Amino acid sequence: MDIRKIEVSELDALLALYEHLHADDQPLPARHQVETVWQTIMANPAHSCFGLYRDARLVASCSISLVANLTLGCRPFALIENVVTHTEHRGRGYGQALLVHAQHFAWAQDCYKVMLMTSSKDPATLRFYESAGFDRYDKQAFIAKPPL
């Protein structure tokens, strides 16, 4: 098992893995638009995509964004998104290892907290995040979406 930042050349592997994230995800726009977004993500020093590799194959991933902050001694905080493990590799501790790695990365950047959200109500999913060190009772999340 190897955990590292995803390389710019690994876009297709990441997109294939994301097929295991949301069954009802919106279709991607034209390839040139996807590549433009990917280049923007990869050029942003405050954003990292970590991948967990098994036999050189990307089997799990998460993204982490560092957010500059003027409170708590100007220490940043981090947001984790798009946590996914390929369905054939779930239940082996890969997701938890990846989240621990992302948290260590955040602590090394002097973040005072790391947050993530899930829309899942599945008790197993909630236990998974708790086992990776996240407290579902510490704060309440509120989501606003644009009107249709």
Image: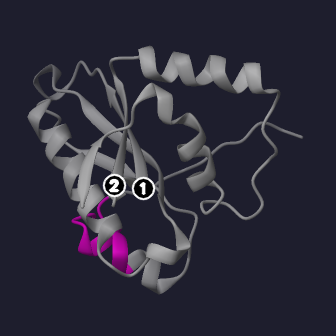
Quadrant of the frame with the N terminus: bottom left
Q: Nearer the viewer, residue 125 or 62?
A: 62
Left/right placement of residue 117 relative to residue 115 reads: right
Mark 2, residue position = 52
Q: Nearer the viewer, residue 109 or 96?
A: 96
Residue 19: percent from the left, percent from the top? 66, 57
Residue type, mark 1 in image: Arg
Sooner in the amino-acid sequence: mark 2 or mark 1: 2
Q: Is residue 122 visible?
A: yes
The residue drawn where x is 54% and y is 50% is 142
The residue drawn where x is 65% and y is 22% is 35
Task: Assess disc 1: are there few (<14), some (14-19) or many (≥20) residues with their C-alpha within 10 Å of its C-alpha.
Answer: few
The residue drawn where x is 42% and y is 52% is 61
Residue 57, numbered label = 1
Residue 114: percent from the left, percent from the top? 27, 46
The correct choice, above or below, for 37 with respect to 27 in the image is: above
Task: Assess disc 2: are there few (<14), some (14-19) or many (≥20) residues with their C-alpha within 10 Å of its C-alpha.
Answer: many
Q: Nearer the viewer, residue 51 or 133?
A: 51
The correct choice, above or below, for 90 with respect to 132 in the image is: below
Residue 54: percent from the left, percent from the top? 34, 62
* Number of numbered labels in the structure image: 2
Q: Is residue 134 part of the magenta span, yes or no?
A: yes
Q: Nearer the viewer, residue 120 or 58?
A: 58
Q: Is residue 21 part of the magenta span, yes or no?
A: no
The residue drawn where x is 56% and y is 77% is 121
Q: Is residue 135 visible?
A: no
Q: Which residues are magenta?
A: 127-138
The correct choice, above or below, for 24 with respect to 131 in the image is: above
Residue type, mark 2 in image: Leu
**Badge nearest the viewer, 2 or 1:** 1
Q: Secondary structure at mark 1?
A: strand
